[in-house]
Amino acid sequence: MCNLVISCLPALGFTNASGLAKLSFLFDNGVSNSFHVYIEREGDFNWFFDNEHIVRTESFPLPQDMSKSVASNIGCLFDNLTDDDNSDELYEIIYQYRERHCFRFGFRGQDVPDVYLASKSGKLEISCEESDIQFNYLIEFEAFYQQLKNALKKYRNLSFPDS
């Protein structure tokens, strides 16, 4: 099991920062790894909570190698699609899944890595398979969403203090 710390700070002042907030994820399972997402609109935070039930309950809709992450399985599917396949139908299935499980689809028009949230073995899998960032972690659902709620509450108190 992996430890996770989520923080959210106003983006102002960070190098190469654009947008409203810097949402950071720090994983530690003996080796520390992190990634950051710059959120451009306040409403974008809702994507996590709007899709929480789906992330918890929806299975990957196509056959997959259970020893690999969701991110890796999607990459393999794209690599192996041919014109002989029902590629339009498969692309649509993958597209719909990504809308509900992938940061890049949740934060349209923003420079966000292809990070997936998915249910696996009763835990939350957070995975990414890009050329410059690869990881696959299992954490407790409750820990993820509680950390996220706490980080957003702290961010909102910093950014919009009561007058």
Image (cartoon, helix red, strand yellow):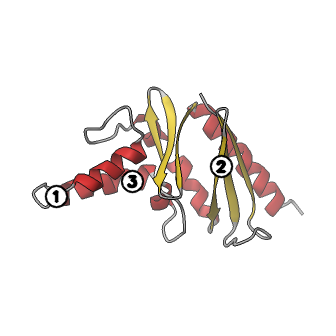
Q: Residue 14, relative to residue 75: is it above or below?
A: below
Image position of 22 (left or right of 55): right
Say which of marks 1 and 3 sits in front: 1
Q: Are marks 2 and 1 in contact (CB under 8 Å)?
A: no
Say which of marks 2 and 3 sits in front: 2
Q: Which residue is mark 2?
A: 34
How far apart marks 1 and 3 lie (CA) works out to 20 Å
How many marks are shown on the rendered structure?
Answer: 3
- The kind of secondary structure element at disc 1 is loop
Instruction: Tell me the tag on residue 140.
Output: none
Foreground: 151 or 42?
Answer: 151
How far apart marks 2 and 3 lie (CA) works out to 22 Å
Foreground: 134 or 150?
Answer: 134
Q: Name the residue type under label 2.
A: Ser
Whole-percent x and y of residue 65?
31, 35
Image position of 40 (left or right of 53): right
Q: Which residue is mark 3?
A: 98
